[in-house]
Image (cartoon, helix red, strand yellow):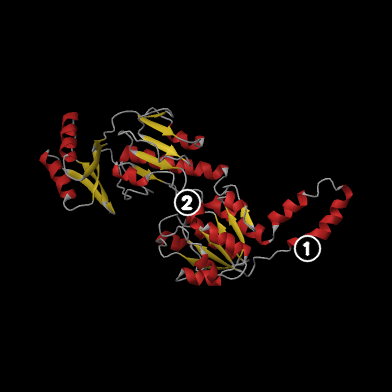
Amino acid sequence: MNTLTLDKVKTIKTLNNIAESGLNVFKNENYNIDDESESPDAIVVRSFNMHAIEFDTNLKAIARAGAGVNNIPVDKCTEQGIVVFNTPGANANAVKEIVLTALMASSRNLFAGVSWTKTLQGKGEQVPSLVEAGKKQFVGKEIKGKKLGVIGLGAIGALVANDALNLDMDVIGYDPFISINTAWELSRNVQRAMTLEELFTESDYITVHVPLTDDTVGMFNEKAFSMMKPGVHILNFSRGGLVNETDMAEALERGIVGKYITDFPNENILNMKNAVPVPHLGASTSESEENCAIMATRQVKDYLETGNIKNSVNFPNASIPYTGKRRITAFHHNIPNMVGQISSAISNNNLNIADMINRSRGEFAYTMVDIDNNLNDNVISELEEEIKKITGIVTVRVI
């Protein structure tokens, strides 16, 4: 059980190259960026594998400059009271653009055609005639009028769906957990699939935009392929583990899947017939890296300075306006009477509550309380000690 009071200069550690525009968020006297620190207040990371790292008790937050958090031991962080942030939507436009590029390029056999053309090097004046003679092997299909199935209608999926409509495709989407915000942004012309099976059977092209979980791992498998139109193109710019590669190789070999375009190549993919391996370029634009870095660092800064939480993958999102009053934050198990016990500890110290919020997420909850009194260090210390003695408390901070 840790007590974490914010009374000092905060140390930020990075585990990857983070865009300077993001690090500029910490360019003031209250922060110190030290990539060698053994006891940082927060860590900003991109793809660095953190599963083998032991976390110092001073660590309060980890921010992933990107959407996926597979490289972070989220459960371990939760148990230690470390909030984990990600940046959903910050790289959405970059991924959308590469998905649509890959969709059109693969449909027109552009990748294979360019590779073949390069083999004509050294043929001199014969090149134009060889091109005319050989181009028929790369005749493709137009995407206009074809049906695109979009699995996952979050920030990226919604952008892909809307722009595909503008390219005169028919679009069908499946997302049983679609948010209200996304629903507002999604075109009403996107057809709704009630089941994955419906989307599989109707689509000429399928693009997937869901996280890798126990429910989604290997979702593209022999059973799924058996429902699809012969020659369907599948685009995976989400996570490699969504596809059962053994089943995919068989489906490609038999022509059940016409092309598999993936941003997650490995030795298996490189040996697959009609697989298009993209070297993990989905979010690799200077604009995307800057957007992710700025969003990640702003979320960390806000949490360290106010306790407010937005876009956490393990803590509940919670926010109340920060007015400069002393604020107590507590991360605790989601069990009965926790809020009552925290409130009692405050009243036991003859203090008044000015504002309060409590949000839960599964087995844990997060409580913030603003105190309507001027507090000296002795009162702060006594209050922290009393709250941290409550059974079920994981971390306490006074801001």
Helix, strand or loop at disc 2?
Answer: loop
Would residue 56 appear left or right of 372 to someone viewing this image? right
Residue 271 screen position, x and y as percent: 62, 53
Residue 91 screen position, x and y as percent: 51, 49
Helix, strand or loop at disc 1?
Answer: helix
Residue 42 screen position, x and y as percent: 37, 36
Residue 281 screen position, x and y as percent: 58, 47
Which residue is located at x 41 percent, y 43 percent? 72
Q: Nearer the viewer, residue 113 or 27?
A: 113
Mark number, residue 114: none
- Tell me the quarter of the image containing the N terminus: top left
Type of amino acid under label 1: Lys
Type of amino acid under label 2: Gly
Mark number, residue 89: 2
Which residue is located at x 36 percent, y 46 percent? 74
- Tell me the quarter of the image containing the C terminus: top left
* Distance CA(mark 2)–CA(mark 1): 40 Å
Observer able to see residue 238: no
Q: Which residue is mark 1?
A: 136
Would residue 379 appear left or right of 291 to someone viewing this image? left
Q: In front of the other: label 2 or label 1? A: 1
Q: In terms of sequence position, does the residue under pointer 2 or pointer 1 come before the other? A: 2
